[in-house]
Image (spheres, rainbow, N blue to C red):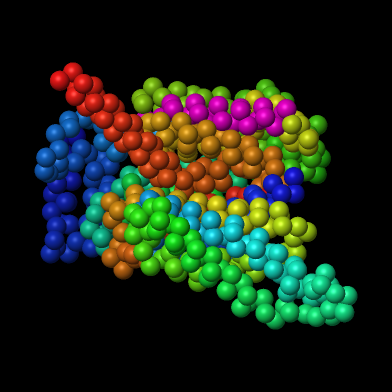
Amino acid sequence: MELANIFVRSIFIDNMIFAYFLGMCSYLAVSKNVKTAFGLGVAVCFVLIITMPVNYLINKYLLQSGALKWISADWVNVDLSFLTLIIFIAVIAAIVQLLEMVIERFSVSLYQALGIFLPLIAVNCAILGGSLFMQEKNFPDVTHSFVYALGSGIGWMLAIVAFAAIRDRLKYSDIPKPLQGNGIAYIITGLMGIGFMAFLGI
Amino acid sequence: MDFLNRWSKKLGRKFEKGRTLYPFRALYDAIDTFLLTPATVTEGGSHIRDAVDMKRIMITVMIALFPPLLFGLWNIGYQHFLSQGIESTLFQCFWYGFLKWLPMVLVVYVVGLTIEIIFAQKRKHEVAEGFFVTGFIIPMIMPPELPLWILAIATAFSVLFAKEVFGGTGYNFLNPALVARAFVFFAYPSVISGDTVWIAEQADAVSGATALGLLMNGSVDSLPSIAEMCIGTIPGSIGETSKIAIALGACILLFTQVGSWRIMLSVIVGGLAMGSLFNVLGITPAMSIPAYEQLLMGGFLFGAVYMATDPVTATHTQSGKFIYGFLIGALAIVIRVLNKGYPEGMMLSILLMNIFAPLIDYAVIQQNIRRRKRRAARSLSTQNLKQ
């Protein structure tokens, strides 16, 4: 029940885009058509569910204050949490590199479609943000962090795919000149945020 | 009639380009085409001949809105006199409700149409008829005691940001009436729910909460009876209370084929399915309310008949309509039962599915393309075999 709660919350209520405005750059740039948006969504999801549990374990057994006591009792007072940011970034960058190689091997068309944005997932704020939120939330074990990562990833993917489909439909609409492009994109995002508020409070 | 026609044409010349009244061209155009058949014909290669244009469709929807409206007006008065403990006649009730409703409708139309006309004038397109229905629905889904200035702000917000920035009627992806209601809901939460908004100046003895409000507080026992909910003698916004009047409106929409039966049916099926599922689980008191009673509460049916079927914001593909409707019904019950903060799930679930409607369409179309490709490949391979 608690896991289901975390899952639903992270998809709809704590949605990376509508609640925290994280990962906006790729959200705005790669939402021109649904197929690429879906590809990027899957990639972000994938990176999230790998990096977050890894970061969770690193945080719990290496970085947290007192985390090193499993090595020896003398190290109870060692606190490496000042390294959190840099270690998280390094882990994310390494895993994105790995993912890039895998996608290039198995789907060249997706690799080409994602283009520059695939390496840029490494600096996608939703990924690092997810890890940092995870650290803040103090989950009791690694399963929780996995579920949280899955939920955040799916939430991000849903948002970008729905957004891409809406933009696709609005291709034929008569948007005032000054609003075309990013202007209307921000308005759509805001309106979508109103819709997602439906789940606030579950 | 001929006289009117000639007079209108003569007047129309004053609004042509270069004349003094040119800045008000859009206003003239709106009134002229509303009263008389426009003389303009389709340019280019379109050859569809049909007497039904957007104005006639919108007017059909407005006619279909009349049964719940008339009942709702009477009901406002009835609830008022009931809570005061005063005997009243049918006409008194109706008149009281009408006086409550009139300022709301005036405010909505004045604010909305002013914005529409300014945009139509500036952007050189016609004033579209879409707002007649939107402006008609907005007062019906708001609480009768809503302050008028909030109503004006909500209307302005929804017309501007849900419609005009996308180019006006037909281009919006969210239902403007729902955006107006959601705007009030999130911007002024204390105004739109609670015990006091649904009945004016109520006496202490009578509880004025809606059925869903009661549900939220956990007082399941004091819910109104099924008969009351069907006929509609319960507190609530103007449009939503009488299920019989809504059914009448639904008949008009279905008979004229203006509303989609696919959406109406699948919303109800979705609501029933989710309600039954919760019945089986039955953990909280809200879950154990029979599924059919869930359908009768709040704005569920009103939303299913008048708002989910909006042809612009719903899915455009036929099989997509089933998915869209089912998810609306199911989500409405989920939000209603699980979410303590929002007793009215229908509005939010339609809004949420409006967001996903283009995505459902996309999925359905892609599925179609894949199926046809497979079929083409199959027939090609059998041809090759024959040769």
Residue B354, percent across and down?
46, 45
Please say whether residue B210 is visible from this viewpoint: no
B58 falls in the magenta region? no
Q: Nearer the viewer, residue A72 or B159?
A: A72
Could you tell me residue B11's position as x and y percent? 17, 51
The residue located at (61%, 53%) in the rendering is: A151
Q: Is residue B158 left or right of residue A95?
A: left
Quarter of the figure with residue B223: top right
> Which residue lies at the image location 70% right of the left edge and 43% below the top edge?
B338
Q: In the rendered image, which quarter is residue A48 located in?
A: bottom right
Start-end of magenta stretch: B258-280
- Horizontal side of B60 relative to A123 (left or right) equals left
Taking the magenta stretch, the answer to whether it contains residue B267 is yes
Q: Is residue B245 above or below residue A118?
A: above
Q: Residue at 35% across / 39% down in the picture?
A: B366
Q: Measured along the vertical axis of the image, is residue B89 above or below residue B162?
A: above
Counting from the top left corner in percent of width and height, residue B21 is at 20, 61
Residue B381 seen: yes
Determine which quarter of the picture holds residue B111.
Answer: bottom left
